[in-house]
Amino acid sequence: MTDGQSLALDVSALSAGYGRFDVVHDIALKVGPGEAVALLGPNGAGKTTVLKAIMGLVSQRRGSIRVAGEDVSAFPAHRVARGFAAIAPEGRRLFLDQTVEDNLLLGGLHLRRDRGRLQTLLKSVYELFPVLYEYRRRLSSYLSGGEQQMVAIGRMLMSDPKVMLLDEPSVGLSPVAVGVMVDALLKLRRRGASLLLVEQRIDVAVRVCDRLYVMTHGAIVDEMTPDDVRNEGLSIINKYLG
Amino acid sequence: METERIEAPRATPALAGAGFRPRFRTIGLALFVAAYLAATALVAHSDLGVQSLVLVAAVFGVLAISLDLVAGMLGLYSLGQGGFFAIGAYFTTIVVNSLGWNVFLVLLIVLLIAGLIGLAVGAMSLRVSGLYFAITTFIFTLVLTVLATDLKITGGLQGLLGPAFPDFPEGLESLGTPVAWCVMLALLLCVGFVWSIRQSPLYPVLLAIRDAERFAEAAGARTSLIKIGVFGVSAAMAGGAGWLFSFLGVVSPGQFDWAVSLNILVMVLIGGINTTVGPVIGAAFVSMFPALVNINPWLQEMVYGALSILAVTLLPGGVMSLLRRVAAFAWSAPPQAEFAVSAINRADAPVEASLFRKFASANAVAAQARGSEPDYAVECRGVQFSYGTGLMVLRNVDLAVKRGDIHGLIGPNGSGKSTLANVIAGRLQPLAGSTLIKGMRLDGASPSKRAELGMRRTFQAAELVRELTPIQNVMVGLFSLKPRIIQRAAFWPLLRSGRRDMAWMEGRSREALEMVGAGAWVGRAVGDVPHGVEQLTQLASVCVAGPDIIVLDEPATGLSAREVDHLAEILTHLKGHGVTMIIIEHQTRFLFPLCDRVTVLNAGEVILTGTAEEVRAHPVVRQVYLGELDE
Amino acid sequence: MLQFVVSGVAIGAVYGLIGMALAITFYVTRIINFAQGQMMMTTVMVTAEVCAAGYPTWAAALLGLGCACVLGVLSYLIAVRPILAFNRFSFGWLVSTLGFAVIVQNAAAYIWGPTSQAFPSMFRATSFHIFSAVMTGQQLLAIVTAVVLTVVFELVRRGTLFGKIGMATAADPEMATAVGVNTTVVAIIAFAVSALYAGVAGLLIGPTTFANPYLGDTFGTFGFIAMMIGGGTEKPIAAMFGGLLLGLCAEGANAMINSQASDWFPFIVLVVVLIVSPRGLFSAGSLFRSRGRVVAAAQG
């Protein structure tokens, strides 16, 4: 993990925000290839802003963001989206007036000339979420919350990104649907995906990830492993979460 | 975090005004009025060319003020001003020319008619928001222009010759042209009118309706009625401008079409939106533009088009923002002491415990003294809610909050907590079920109605007016406590009661801010204070009214550990004075020690209600919410 | 009776095209381009000018459309994009697009003078009889063109990747960026296409109105009414239906009431429509199209 070239995501000294103030300050985080890393923290800590800054979706950012060795910190969002990073955003943000398959294909926009690869990716998404194949011609607005989350993750997969950013995929899901989501994330990990997962549910993060960052007030304040949490109990995180 | 510094804030205009001694302000005003009257006399004696140039500019000044009243203070971009202008001008011309009525009687009728039509148009177009308001008012002007062109009575495209303005009574002829006095005094009146509003406690309320409507509503303002009412006043003012305009020459459709409405907007934007004199400056510039740039008319129009594009793209604050920047540079305001970002960490900002008694609700204290029969402050029975996309957000939710309790509401994101808060506060109407406040069924009652019953709420992301100071924001919370604020706003500074109430409201708001420990921040715009102070300002705006029920939506979000402790202290004091609170929160470490009872929501359903210990012990809560590991 | 239907549909098709032009840019950027009518005027003026210089009509028309597209893109770059960068100041486009319109219109008046010039007729002699009504070749061309352009628009929007990108940009620009859409390019294309539609409308109506620099105002207004009646703010195709209805109302009023009625009757229709159904007649969620959404099984 010391070799900068091999990291899926390497963020250092990142400050970002929207208006007159930065929301996050001096963020440094790394995601190795095939690694899953969680970003935990209370509401308002700036977790979403970190993800958006990596995607290039905030109005101001400073610092360095490298994806698979390439410096993307000056790229506009639509270039970052071309195979570097992809996001399954908070609230899912599907294109609700389009079908499930169209949503997925829009995710693979930059591969539009590579039909074969697109089809392979599409197939792998349907393998991961068989129910989406069944619903592929439906308008995405007609799906349930859990199914919509699947589409959001599928859309992210379709661009075949070097690093995947997931913003609270468990929000608003029933316990059963959360279980399905966790299984899917574990499957993705077995396929070798590199994940940066923002979560509020510590149990999900602990089950899925190799390392956990803790964020409060726009800064990363601690880093630990799931084993630390298992051994020492929740208190080592809860002291930050309140 | 603690080390971050914020640049020194610029003083807001209202505050700068308050800094002057009242006597200096009175003298300044008297000087201004005297100078204005002298200038008017000059105009009234000058030749016809100059006069018509100045008077037309003044009439457009009135129009621009009428637009700024709705666009600047309420964010309603009306393109109907040209229409009301036309109503005033045509009505006056036709009635005075054919019936020979007294022009001042006609003025009253014009104001009334234009105002009523304004109310009707406002009521109709405010059903749809933002852009559609601009579009409907645009269509209103379009239709009126077509009518003016096609009706026989309006003289078609040629238009009508306006009536003559009556002469001065004997002895006053030496004053010069009467219509000049009339127009210039009308402009002064309108400037005075909006200036008064800006000095009154209505001003922060209007801006709150513009920027944070839910906040204004929760403070007891009937926001839709106020919007419609102010639009009616603005329409009457534009109608009055039409009345003035009819004395200046020919009245024809081309003077009122939709391009004129947009030009009025250009005037406001060039001069400076939401300023008292900016619109007048803009109006003078735009209407005198042809005289200033005396070239081929088509080229001149092209220059004008280019200028208006440049104005909105390069100088969105208008001339006034430029002047202000120059003034700030010239005076080079001494840099204020820097504050650390975390205000509450400052030793000199403790909670003012002694002040809580002052803000205690009479109701709550009485209930507390009675020993309080076991009644419920808030009840929900079988509440169902859906945002219409299919997913049920709340399913059959029952909730009973005892009077004087702090009742916690926890659950994962998306479990429906905020939705439930909105249902309780009246912001959302449930599909089924009912909410009761102090035993009264309140189905369909608005948030402002609930505010009158003593219920207040805070919002997850603080809803405040960022360009105003914390004091002005907290004053919004006092809106429903003083009578006839709206009626008095038009001449607020002239009223003894106005000055007294303003001093009282300012004092009380300051105290409320001191009470929550934000007293050090009263002099800045809310946009320049750190997040924690924003949250405290929000809390102060709620406490200042002495409510007996408060709904808090994630008050600890984004606060530091010390700020959270500070918040807990405030809430404990409030509880000590009998206030019932419903707190939605994630941070259980902050919440559980405060709460008498806690309700857990998940996926729109109540999982259980119990004491903090019972909730903590519940296996589902441990797994789903606290993230306990089931291994 | 039938005569007014024929002429109403023909003129309505032209209104509908301008309405669609307004709606396309609104769909992608959420602003109403007050300069839209000027694109139409520019096409008409340039075509007339080039034709008068002796070039073939088709070349003149193509050049006219090209100029309109360039102007459309310029209106985006000059009057819209800088404003959308200021988020908090979101109504400035009211002023800047009008300012752009003022510049274009007065430039045209400055260059070509304020009077009307001849415009080449495309199907001068041909006319058809449909029962008792007469339809000129020009009218037939207008109707056919409008149908073709409407169908093409819908097919592209729903059936092609570019259409889907446009829909995505309209629905959620930020998310569209996050999947790799360059929204600036999408907006530029949308403005060019809408200028093209307005320009085509100009070619269709030019032989009737002749070439005049003030055409843009009148037809821009009628296009706006078409969009509002139809509900084109939510669905561009609805603006075409609105235009047809508007054309029928205007010609119908001329036939039934008096020859001046088309000046004001459409406005009455507009007001009534807006009172009954503020979002237009043919949009989703309007009176005629309130599709009851099935409550999806909420499994979570």
Image (tube, coloured by chain):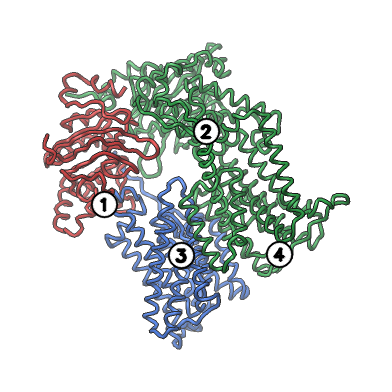
Q: Residue furthest right?
A: B170
- Residue B11: mark in rendering: 2
Distance (Cα) linking label 3 and label 4: 31 Å
The answer to whether A163 is drawn above or below residue B178 in the figure is above
Which chain letter matches label 4? B
The residue singled out by tag 4 in the image is: B250
Chain that the image shows in green:
B
Residue pointed to by mark 3:
C36
Same chain letter for marks 4 and 1: no
Crowd band around label 1 with a 10 angstrom C-alpha radius: few (<14), some (14–19), many (20+): many
- Relative to B178, say whether A64 is above or below: above
| Marks 2 and 4, the one that precedes in the sequence | 2
**Mark 4 secondary-structure assignment:** strand
- Can marks 2 and 4 be said to lie on one chain? yes
Q: Which one is in front in this view, the residue at disc 2 or the one at disc 4? A: 2
Chain shaded blue: C
> Which hue belongs to chain A?
red
Q: Which residue is mark 1?
A: C180
In the displayed structure, does residue B620 sit left or right of residue C255?
A: left
Residue at (25, 44) in percent of width and height: A73
**Chain that bears disc 2:** B
Q: Nearer the viewer, residue A136 or A196?
A: A196
Dot 3 or dot 1, earlier in sequence = 3
Q: CA distance from mark 2 to mark 1?
A: 43 Å
Label 3 or label 4, whichever lies nearer to me, is 4
Looking at the rendered structure, the secondary structure element under dot 1 is: loop
Residue B333 position in % (x across, y down): 51, 33
Q: How many marks?
A: 4
Q: Residues within 10 Å of mark 3 (few under 14, many from 20)?
A: many
Residue lying at 54% horizontally and 15% vertically, measured from the top left? B357
In the rendered image, residue A117, in percent from the top left (x then y), is placed at: 14, 55
* Left or right of residue C127: residue A108: left
